[in-house]
Image (spheres, helix red, strand yellow):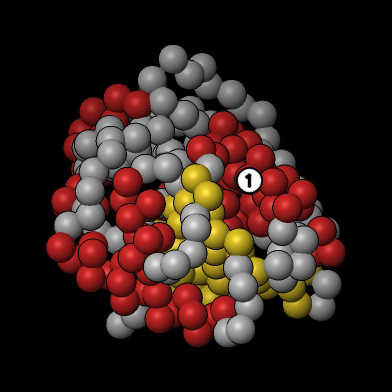
Amino acid sequence: MITECRLPLPSVPHSADALPSLILLVRHGATEWSVNGQHTGRTDLPLTDLGVRQATAVGKVIRQWLGNQEPLVYTSPLARAVDTAALAMPGHRAEQVDSLMEYDYGIFEGLTTSQILERDESWDLFSSRGCQGGENIIRVAARCDGFVARLERAAKGRAVVAFTHGHLSRILTVRLLGMPGSAAAGLWNDTASVSAINVHRGKLVLVGWNITAG
């Protein structure tokens, strides 16, 4: 059970010299729960037929951003992300990384936002209180920072593609930009969408958001 923490969520400025030159974060294709708006954390749902089509199509978007660069590819170990990676980038080995798994929603797993608010009208996923029996924003941001540290060790100057999840990719994006995890509340991304971060004037900047194949 998570106890509430009122400590501020610090920003973490990252040195662009130590990080990849291009980072593409790809949300997995559609699942039954994503279509219905149900919070899907660790429940390992497969892609729907729509999700398979989306995952295949987003490969073109990824190739356009990469150009001739040969990327390092990472994925959440959950099936919906693993399968999206395989369909979008056939022929590329995607390394499974636990820190790319979705937010653990605890007792709210499988519920829609409306259903959660009926139980707790003050609930906010991006507050330090988080999800009973699961995670809070501080823990998820720390996981994201762990993945960033991994990139600093292994992917300096390289292109990276990471297949992950809706909330996790939003939180990872703001952490890469040196912003607190709670800033992710101001972002939204669709299934099988790409966000792009690269180095501009010595800083990591968001250059593309919620890009889909159409």
Residue 9 or residue 95, whichever sits in front:
95
- The residue drawn where x is 71% and y is 41% is 10
Say whether residue 134 is left or right of residue 139. left
- The residue drawn where x is 56% and y is 32% is 139
Amino acid type shown at disc 1? Phe
- The residue drawn where x is 68% and y is 60% is 177
Screen quadrant of the C terminus: bottom left
Say whether residue 136 is left or right of residue 206. left
Residue 187 vertical placement versus 9 (above, below): below
- Residue occupied by mark 1: 147
Screen quadrant of the N terminus: top left
Q: Do we see residue 6 in this rendering? A: yes
Tag 1 secondary structure: helix
Say whether residue 33 is left or right of residue 43. left
Image coords of residue 64 (percent x, y): 50, 84
Image coords of residue 199 (percent x, y): 74, 73
Image coords of residue 115 (percent x, y): 19, 37
Residue 73 or residue 212, whichever sits in front:
73
The quadrant in which residue 116 appears is top left
Residue lying farthest to the front in this orientation? 91
Residue 126 or residue 165, whichever sits in front:
165
- The residue drawn where x is 60% and y is 61% is 72
Circle 1 residues within 10 Å: few <14, some 14–19, many ≥20: some
Image coords of residue 119 (percent x, y): 23, 28
Q: Do we see residue 122 in this rendering? A: no
